[in-house]
């Protein structure tokens, strides 16, 4: 116990003296939960679940928010409060939390139409009907429909919550196709 | 915990639970690792209780709350505007009980910080290793002459949600078209800095539809207020000529109320109104004050990495009651609760307390489809909480109509997330 305490003190001294160590991944992640839900599993229809998202996707998104390359209402202002190391810590935390698909309603007809749109336009990157997170792709399947509707439709019209690549794809989709897509992803759990 | 130190105990408890159902519960019943008493099941206390239990089920958490149900202040201004229902803002503690939080519906009346004992109105006593107080606020009755608890039954504050919210709503609803509502706003610091100004907008939203000749006057003790430019822009756009605001320097500071004649007195002027809402100045919750945790300014000084009172060891204070540079908001209380719990866990484990991170975001509505926000990111530096430079801030004044609509939608999603995090 005594040696442990001494080690603790020594460690604290090192942390204090050297390049200031930041908050733990959990400490940082917990500050996001008020909006993104407990452990990143959102209960709010317009806020995305970020639990289980690929770490590199989270870091990239946060950097782009901070630098204004990705449009947003509030994320840009929040991202300015954190360093790259913070982003990496947050990303470690959320990427290791289990994904939870949103419990929500969808129209079977629209989902059917959406599946066709997905296969034509999205499956090449968002594999496995939007379940896959390989190649640092954000998971789409089981994400909140309202959130997807907002960001996909807004990114159809302007650079909103999207990378440049996505924006180019989105410009070629119609409003109806976007709606159908959101129902398809809601139908995938 | 006699012959075992805490660290050994956790390892032992861990091994025992690995043995299965027989070992662990017996040990948990025998001796909790630590007894933590939390006072107040609001935005701070509910989160503290949940995060303690989530981190370590061997900690006994007793949550003492005076009301059988919690009614949220956030979104309660919408009720005044005739939108939403108070039931949607009302929560019970079943979700917390389900994760093993011991719920005690009673009023904490005494806290002995030396003997570490809490006593209640119902005559119960709770010995604890640590206490976390998140009792919200109490009003400074008499700060506005004539305004005391009895007066608030006639002229509501509606700044603790519940019956007060419904009383003000009833008065606004019963008012004649062409009447005037006066809202008084206090000096800083007070809970929810944008609250009075959002409230004006929500009442105007109702008037616009039902009593278009009516007016709202805000008498303020201050010269500036939160999100001021955004509020003024929103008022002008949706309720032109309906809302006026008088600053403290322009004689807006209310000194006295004549309850019977529904008249307010500032230094130089008398204001008669059909409906009055007095948001009286306030301070740390009564129990925190009684326990000797409040400073001269009425708020509780804390050490910012642990939220431990600087006046009494082993007692932590979070939320509105604390004296910190963070705005007194639900989000701040939530964020502070998590820092406090992480510190208590580290202390119990004999580990150094980690580096904290604190965040606040807060949405306000002008109409159900027009919202904006403020964000704050704080860090710990040289023993203080400091805002990260060039971060956070308010929504841009020139945001698109679409962005305002999206922020109004986010306001509701925020509410669902933060209350689900608290109550399950
Ligand atoms: C109109 C209005 C709108 C608001 N809108 C927002 C918003 O949109 N966003 C935001 O972030 N914040 C908002 N706030 C602020 C927010 O409500 C508070 O900052 C938040 O509730 C603070 O949390 P707390 O835990 O400190 O206190 P509270 O949430 O008030 O909880 C305190 C609890 O302690 C209990 N209690 C007190 N004393 C005792 C005792 N002796 N024994 C037992 N129980 C006791 C009380 O009954 C209560 O349940 C708003 C406030 C108002 C008034």
Image (cartoon, coloured by chain):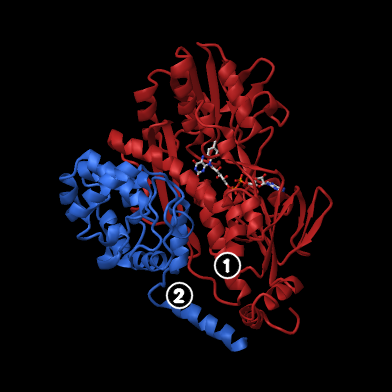
Q: Residue at x 45, y 41 (%)?
A: B412
Where in the figure is residue A69, as x and y percent of width and height?
Answer: 22, 53
Visual hue assigned to chain A: blue
A54 left or right, relative to B207: left
For disc 1, the neighbor class at 10 Å (few under 14, some 14 to 19, many from 20) is few
Q: Nearer the viewer, mark 1 or mark 2?
A: 1
- B114, above or below B330, in the image: below
User: Of helix, strand and loop, which one carries label 2?
Assistant: helix
Quadrant location of residue B54?
bottom right
Residue B103 or residue A88, whichever sits in front: B103
Residue wearing tag 1: B55
Q: Residue at x 44, y 44 (%)?
A: B413
Q: Provide the chain ID for the residue under circle 1.
A: B
- A142, above or below B362, in the image: below
Whether residue B221 is visible to the viewer of this picture, yes or no, is: no
Quadrant location of residue B18?
bottom right
Whether residue B233 is visible to the viewer of this picture, yes or no, is: yes
Chain in red colour: B
For the residues bearing labels 1 and 2, Cβ distance under 8 angstroms: no
Q: CA distance from mark 1 to mark 2?
A: 26 Å
């Amino acid at each position: 116990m005594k040696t442990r305490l001494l080690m603790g003190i020594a460690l604290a001294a090192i942390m204090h003296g050297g390049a200031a160590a930041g908050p733990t991944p959990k400490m940082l992640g917990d500050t996001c939960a008020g909006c993104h839900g407990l452990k990143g599993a959102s209960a709010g229809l317009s806020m995305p679940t970020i639990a289980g998202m690929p770490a590199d996707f989270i870091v990239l998104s946060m950097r782009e928010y901070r630098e204004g390359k990705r449009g947003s209402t509030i994320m840009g202002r929040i991202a300015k409060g954190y360093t790259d190391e913070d982003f990496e810590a947050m990303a470690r935390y959320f990427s290791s939390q289990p994904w939870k698909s949103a419990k929500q309603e969808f129209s079977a007809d629209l989902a059917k139409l959406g599946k066709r749109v997905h296969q034509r336009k999205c499956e090449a990157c968002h594999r496995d009907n939007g379940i896959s997170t390989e190649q640092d792709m954000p998971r789409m399947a089981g994400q909140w429909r309202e959130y997807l509707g907002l960001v996909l439709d807004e990114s159809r019209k302007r650079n909103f919550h999207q990378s440049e690549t996505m924006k180019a794809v989105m410009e070629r989709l119609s409003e109806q196709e976007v709606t159908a897509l959101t129902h398809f992803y809601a139908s995938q759990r | 915990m006699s012959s075992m130190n805490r660290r050994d105990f956790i390892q032992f408890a861990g091994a025992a639970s690995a043995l299965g159902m027989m070992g662990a519960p017996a040990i948990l019943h025998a001796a909790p690792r630590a007894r933590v008493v939390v006072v107040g099941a609001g935005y701070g206390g509910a989160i503290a209780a949940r995060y303690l239990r989530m981190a370590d089920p061997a900690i006994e958490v007793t949550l003492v709350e005076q009301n059988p149900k919690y009614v949220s202040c956030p979104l309660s201004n919408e009720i005044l505007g005739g939108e939403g229902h108070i039931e949607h803002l009302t929560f019970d503690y079943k979700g917390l009980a389900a994760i093993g939080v011991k719920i005690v519906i009673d009023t904490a009346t005494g806290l002995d910080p030396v003997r570490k004992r809490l006593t209640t109105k119902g005559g119960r006593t709770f010995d604890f290793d640590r206490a976390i107080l998140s009792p919200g606020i109490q009003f400074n009755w008499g700060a506005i002459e004539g305004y005391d608890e009895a007066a608030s039954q006639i002229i509501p504050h509606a700044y603790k949600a519940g019956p007060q919210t419904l009383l003000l709503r009833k008065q606004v609803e019963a008012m004649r078209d062409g009447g005037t509502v006066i809202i008084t706003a206090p000096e800083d610091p007070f809970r929810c800095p944008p609250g009075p100004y959002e409230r004006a907008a929500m009442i105007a939203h109702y008037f616009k539809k039902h009593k278009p000749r009516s007016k709202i006057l805000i008498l303020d003790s201050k010269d500036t207020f939160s999100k001021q430019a955004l509020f003024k822009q929103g008022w002008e756009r949706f309720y032109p000529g309906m809302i006026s605001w008088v600053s403290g320097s322009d004689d807006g500071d209310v000194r006295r109320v004549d309850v019977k004649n529904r008249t307010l007195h500032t230094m130089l002027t008398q204001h008669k109104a059909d409906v009055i809402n007095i948001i009286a100045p306030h301070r740390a919750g009564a129990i925190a004050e009684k326990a000797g945790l409040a400073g001269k300014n009425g708020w509780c000084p804390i050490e910012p990495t642990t939220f431990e009172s600087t006046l009494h060891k082993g007692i932590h204070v979070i939320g509105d009651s604390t004296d910190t540079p963070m705005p007194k908001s639900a989000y701040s209380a939530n964020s502070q609760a998590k820092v406090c719990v992480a510190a208590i866990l580290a202390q119990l484990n004999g580990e150094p307390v980690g580096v904290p991170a604190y965040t606040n975001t807060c949405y306000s509505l002008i109409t159900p489809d027009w919202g904006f926000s403020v964000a704050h990111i704080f860090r710990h530096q040289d023993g203080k909480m400091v805002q990260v430079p060039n971060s956070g801030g308010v929504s841009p004044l020139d945001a698109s109509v679409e962005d305002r609509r999206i922020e109004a939608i986010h306001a509701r999603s925020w509410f669902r997330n933060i209350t689900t995090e608290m109550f399950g």
